Image: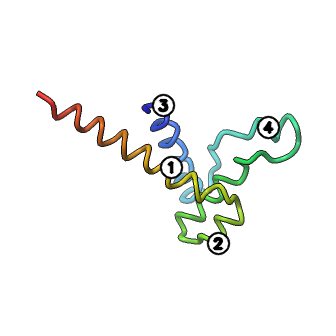
Amino acid sequence: MRLASFVGGYIVLSVIIKRLLDVDVCIPCLWKAVFGWECPGCGLTTALVRVLELDFAGACNANPTVLVVVPTGLACLLTDYFRSRKMSLRP
């Protein structure tokens, strides 16, 4: 679960940096670089930026999988946070 939190945190941080500073620090799509066509994950950063802007229609247009990725990612991050908090509170 810690790996999922790390990856999720990196994605969130890269989306915030892209939104605030207009600097793209996301990992490039290896699939697109090798084969020349988009994978199911392409456009996810754009979709996440649109979600932050509360433009849900634009997010779905950029990548419809955002409807699954965002709730799943939030659930993983919250689960990991509460699990680590519970462990730190033990005597």
Which image quadrant for residue 47? bottom right
The residues bearing labels 3 and 1 have C-alpha atoms spaced at a distance of 14 Å
Residue plotted at (65% across, 48% down): 24
The residues bearing labels 1 and 2 have C-alpha atoms spaced at a distance of 19 Å
Q: Position of residue 60 (x, y in %)?
A: 66, 65
Residue under label 2: 57
Q: Residues within 10 Å of mark 1 (few under 14, many from 20)?
A: few
Residue plotted at (54% across, 68% down): 53
Question: Which of the two discs, 1 and 2, labels the residue nearer the N terminus?
Answer: 2
Vertical order, 79 against 43 (above or below): above
Q: Nearer the viewer, residue 18 or 34?
A: 34
Residue under label 3: 3
Mark 1 near mark 2, Cβ–Cβ under 8 Å?
no
Residue under label 1: 72
Comparing marks 3 and 1, which lies closer to the viewer?
1
Q: Position of residue 4 (x, y in %)?
A: 49, 36
Q: Nearer the viewer, residue 7 or 76?
A: 76
Viewport quadrant of the C terminus:
top left
* Kind of residue at badge 3: Leu
Question: Which of the two discs, 2 and 4, labels the residue nearer the N terminus?
Answer: 4
* Kind of residue at badge 2: Ala
Question: Which of the two discs, 1 and 4, labels the residue nearer the N terminus?
Answer: 4
The residues bearing labels 3 and 2 have C-alpha atoms spaced at a distance of 30 Å
The residues bearing labels 1 and 4 have C-alpha atoms spaced at a distance of 23 Å
Q: Position of residue 85 (x, y in %)?
A: 25, 38
Which image quadrant for residue 21? bottom right
* Kind of residue at badge 4: Trp
State the scheme by which the image is colored: rainbow
Q: Position of residue 57 (x, y in %)?
A: 64, 72
